[in-house]
Amino acid sequence: MSDPAREGAAGNVEYRVAHLHDRLAAEELGELGVRAEIRAGAIAVTGTVPSAQCRETLLRVVREELTGLTVHTDIVVAATTGPDHAEEL
């Protein structure tokens, strides 16, 4: 037997995740390849960003869009500095 309240809540979560994707695509963050997926009743936000500032912006947007939901983030800042030593071949 299905629970209409649970189905409505699940639909609301799916709508909010879709809205997050739309917002990220509309802003400078759209090209990052960040993913937000519903997993076991929580939202998993994963990906790699080019800077710590970009990571902070992304996390702010996620907080704004998914307030009240359980969100797990795994956002990595890509290392953009050059190597500190020569590579030996």
Image (tube, grey):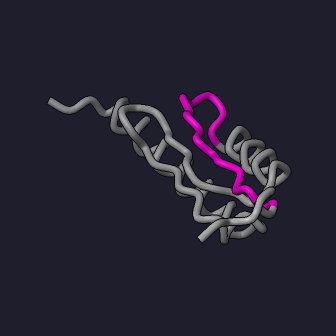
Name which quarter of the figure residue 88 lies in.
Answer: bottom right
Residue 68: percent from left, percent from top: 62, 28
Outermost front residue = 89
Name which quarter of the figure residue 11 lies in.
Answer: top left
Q: Tell me if 53 is positioned left or right of 45 in this view.
A: right
The N terminus sits in image quarter? top left
Residue 87: percent from left, percent from top: 67, 66
| Relative to 24, residue 63 above or below | above
Q: Residue at x 63, y 46 (%)?
A: 75
Q: Tell me if 21 is positioned left or right of 38 in this view.
A: right
Q: Report the front residue among 15 and 75.
A: 75
Q: Which residues are magenta?
A: 66-81
| Relative to 48, residue 72 above or below | above
Q: Residue at x 76, y 66 (%)?
A: 27
Residue 20 in the magenta stretch? The answer is no
Residue 73 in the magenta stretch? The answer is yes
Q: Tell me if 56 is positioned left or right of 69 in this view.
A: right
Residue 24: percent from left, percent from top: 68, 61
Residue 74: percent from left, percent from top: 58, 41
The C terminus sits in image quarter? bottom right
